[in-house]
Amino acid sequence: MENRTDKNSYTILFAIGMVLVVGALLAFTASSLKPKITENQRIEKQQNILYAMGVNDNEGTSANFISTQNAAEAFSKYITKQLVIQNGNVKEDNEAYLIDVKKEKSASNSDPSKRRLPLFVGVKDGKTFYVAPIYGKGLWDAIWGYVSVDENMVVQGAYFDHKGETPGLGANIKERYFMDDFIGEHLIDENGNFKGITVAKGNADPKNEDKTDNEVDALAGATITGDGVTAMIKSDLKLYKPYFDNLKTN
Amino acid sequence: MGLLSKKDAKLITDPLADNNPITIQVLGICSALAITAQLKASIVMALSVMAVLAIGNVVISLMRNIIPSKIRIIVQLVVVAALVIVVDQILKAFSYELSKTLSVFVGLIITNCIIMGRFEAFALANGPWRSFLDGIGNAAGYGLILVIVGFFRELLGSGTLLGFPVLGDPIEKTGLYSIGYENNGFMLLSPMALIVVGIIIWVQRSRNKELIED
């Protein structure tokens, strides 16, 4: 007897059946879980922003967000204003943190004036923090982060994350020892121009005591990811400079 | 009489040493190189592959009599990809933190040749229970090598284990670093994983001459 599973008709029917079953299964899982996943991502954004301005549960050398349950409450407590800057105009928008920086960035390729820049103003212990999101690309996939600065564009805190950098190498951008290096670094050079912060290899300052050199120490084995961090800080935070210039003159 | 018969127990113990998927069958090398710079990543990857391989082996084994032989590789690929994506989605919804740790590995799990290799070589010809054991055994053999490589790469490359500084602080020059020891940054790069795997293969074959091919 010929094996029925060798027949062409059976093979085709099986393939069709398999595609239908698997497709339905995946579609069902994706759509039924979507609200929960979106909610998780929303909370994560709040945690990221709070982390950058120093509201976190850090202990020892590990980076910990404020807990998921407390995120919403802390977010409304610490973040006093959410701003959207577009074309030099500043307006308040309580959903600014939901702006997709990736979409804004790609839309601005054709028309830079269209880009909306979210900025979160937070107050903690009487000190004002300005938190800005940044977005760029690492070695394998997207990298992004939130940087908080004071009125003089001196970094007060930074949070970086990535989609698919190599564990142990590029993925270390989200480790405390890398992110904490940015604290106190100046984004502006001594002449008042925007210079950014370079993730530099072989700089002679591994303890990062020189805060005005616009450099932090690079990660071993993560050259391209580090360059990506440098690039996204340069390109994205530069756009906020006019806002801070205004802040000073007023 | 134990929980497993002698024959079944062999399914688990064989891949740990004399039929190890990495050192003997030389499968799954790509992921072994990519993620072993840290011990923690090695452990996470080993556990993920174990879950996927055990469940996938059972699914393929249950389907083995109805899979058309002409498209069996495609069917295997679909099963493992669907499995990984469903698990990833569920983790994203209910355990977001864990899913973020795992997200990097999802692509690497799907393309891990050990998984396809076991589907093809074992699950298509054996029952679900034996396939399950084979999946656990092979993933454990894979994980064992991953953990060994991860241990040496993290220890010699970063001076830490599971993120904990065991050799002292390289910048403050405490512990071992105070007498002039330095981390070997080269250990963090993928080529060193290949060399460590090569050393394991050498040690294993010199202890058991039967494993040496002509």
Image (cartoon, rainbow, N blue to C red):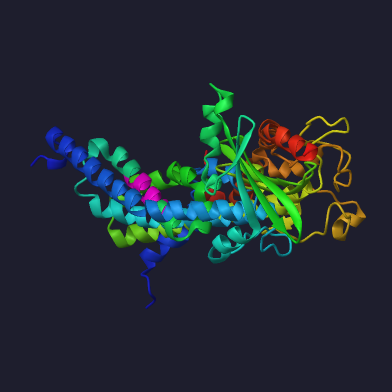
Viewer-proximal residue among B68 and A52: A52
* x and y, in percent, of residue A152 in the image: 80, 42
Q: Can the viewer see residue B212?
A: no
* x and y, in percent, of residue A245 in the image: 76, 35
From the viewer's perspective, is B84 left or right of A208? Answer: left
Overall secondary structure of the magenta section? helix
- Asked whether residue A153 is drawn in magenta, I would say no
From the viewer's perspective, is A129 left or right of A192? Answer: left
Q: At x 39% / y 76%, what residue is drawn?
A: B2
Viewer-proximal residue among B47 and A140: A140
Extreme residue toward the front, this view: A250
Magenta region: B79-88
Viewer-proximal residue among B187 and A67: A67
Extreme residue toward the bottom, this view: B1
From the viewer's perspective, is B168 left or right of A118? Answer: right
Q: At x 61% / y 52%, what residue is drawn?
A: A48
Extreme residue toward the top, this view: A110
* x and y, in percent, of residue B67 in the image: 22, 44
Q: At x 54% / y 35%, what residue is drawn?
A: A102
Q: How many dots with numbers?
A: 0
- Asked whether residue B80 is drawn in magenta, I would say yes
**Image quadrant of residue B212?**
top right
Is residue B42 shown above or below A12?
below
Viewer-proximal residue among A206 and A86: A86
* x and y, in percent, of residue A230 in the image: 71, 34
Q: Quadrant of the N terminus of chain B?
A: bottom left
Q: Can the viewer see residue B10?
A: yes
